Image (tube, helix red, strand yellow):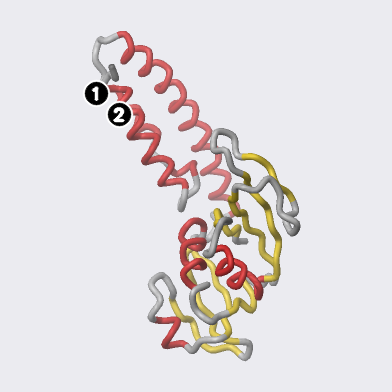
Amino acid sequence: MQSPLDILSAEQAAAYATFLQQTPWYKWDFAGDIAALKTARTEVFRDRERFFALRNEFAAKSVYAGVIADAVANVGADALRIRMIMSGADQDALADVDGVTVIGNRPEGVEIETGRYRALTTLLVRLSELDLAIVEMAGNDDIMFTAISPDPSHPEALFSFPRQGYGDYRHLFVVKTADLLVRLQDMAQGPMRVEHVHDY
């Protein structure tokens, strides 16, 4: 039978996993998690055990996060948005895509701004359904992405390895940004699926 802190800690872990998809880990409110655990705990042995272990873990992470946040404040945090230049569509068509902010026309194509991290991967999968190409992303014309498949290797992958506990394999690719959307579109047919596009 689950104790109250078993349930709460599972909810906290799920919320933290969602948070990490778009935000650096050190910005998480570990102190808030500790307070929630303290409020919800009971005198059941399992709760006392969970509280002791998780409180110590979250307290250590909170201290370390503070150190990182201070260091980042001195050099500047990563931008949460990224710019790229797209060819194959006009400003109006791109402006209609949710998550895209059109900056303006450039000789090479239309400059847009989007979110980064998980939001970018999701957006690029959507853009791959259109007849578009990325001219460059944040000044780069190469990009890395990972994909998941049931096959242990892929002839074009830089590296392939099993995902522990999943029974499938992760493959690492580096391609020209101009080819990325075509590659993502091809994966929509299966059995390989994109996992994450690593922005700059």
Residue 132 circle label: none
State which quadrant residue 37 falls in.
top left
Q: Quadrant of residue 163?
A: top right
Amino acid carrying mark 1 in the image:
Ala
Secondary structure of residue under mark 2 = helix
Task: Determine crowd level at label 1: few under 14, some 14-19, many 20+ residues with C-alpha closer than 10 A.
Answer: few
Q: Position of residue 148 (x, y in %)?
A: 58, 50
**In the image, what residue occupies the spot 37% across and 32% down?**
31
What residue do we see at 35% from left, 31% from top?
Answer: 10
> Which numbered marker is on residue 40?
1
Where the C terminus falls, by quadrant? bottom right
Label 2 and label 1: CA atoms lie apart by: 8 Å
- Residue 69: percent from left, percent from top: 51, 44
- Which amino acid lies under the numbered mark 2 shown in the image of this protein? Leu
Residue at the spot x=43%, y=18% of the render? Answer: 53
The quadrant holding residue 177 is bottom right
Q: Position of residue 42 (x, y in %)?
A: 24, 15
Q: Is residue 49 above or below residue 26?
A: above
Report the side of 166 relative to 144 (left or right): left
Question: Relative to the observer, which residue lies in front, 144 or 183?
Answer: 183
Which of the image's four quarters has the N terminus? top left
Name the residue beneath numbered marker 2: 8
| Mark 2 surroundings within 10 Å by alpha-carbon count, few (fewer than 14), some (14 through 19), many (20 or more) | some
Direction from residue 103 to residue 33 in the image, left or right:
left
Q: Nearer the viewer, residue 101 or 171?
A: 171
Q: Secondary structure at mark 1?
A: helix
